[in-house]
Amino acid sequence: MNTPGHDPRAGVDPVLARRARLDRLAATGRGVGWALILVAVVAFGIGLARGFDPWGRVVVAALAASTATLAPAIVLGYAVRAAEREDRERGRG
């Protein structure tokens, strides 16, 4: 029903909506982090074959960026799961 003054989100719990956004953010961070590890592995392989002069920097940069994205994303994902589990245990979900 799309009438003036009707808020289609009126039945949505803001806490659950925020938790869903954080879960999507964590999933995106995990995807980016793992992709960066793949970049580091491929760069390492190329470095083995052609020399590490430029590729060593790519490996280090990709691993550093992976750490900066993957670690917080994993922690955030665990936090979201813990909140969902606590809601279920208390009968709120």
Image (spheres, rainbow, N blue to C red):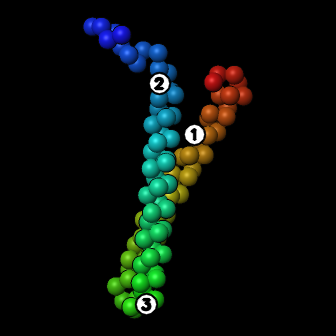
Please identify, in this view, whether the residue under mark 1 or under mark 3 is nearer the observer.
3
Q: Amino acid at mark 2?
A: Pro
Give the residue displayed 44% in from the left and 76% down from the top.
Answer: 42
Name the residue tied to disc 3: 49
Name the residue tied to disc 2: 14
The location of residue 93, given as percent across then percent down, is 63, 24
Within 10 angstroms of label 2, few (less than 14), some, or many (20 or more) residues? few
Secondary structure state at the residue bearing disc 2:
helix
User: Which dot marks residue 15?
Assistant: none
Q: Identify the mark nearer the N-term, 2 or 1.
A: 2
Q: Give how far apart the Cα atoms at labels 3 and 2 are.
A: 53 Å
The residue at the far left in this view is 4
Q: Identify the mark nearer the N-term, 3 or 2.
A: 2
The location of residue 85, given as percent across then percent down, is 67, 34
Q: Amino acid at mark 3?
A: Ala
Name the residue tied to disc 1: 80
Secondary structure state at the residue bearing disc 1:
helix
Q: Viewer-proximal residue, 15 or 4?
A: 4
Q: Give how far apart the Cα atoms at labels 2 and 1 are.
A: 14 Å
Contact? badges 1 and 3 (CB < 8 Å)? no
Secondary structure state at the residue bearing disc 3:
helix
Within 10 angstroms of label 1, few (less than 14), some, or many (20 or more) residues? some
* Location of residue 64 (image quadrant): bottom left
Q: Identify the mark nearer the N-term, 1 or 3.
A: 3
Give the residue displayed 38% in from the left and 16% down from the top.
Answer: 8
Quadrant of image for the N terminus = top left
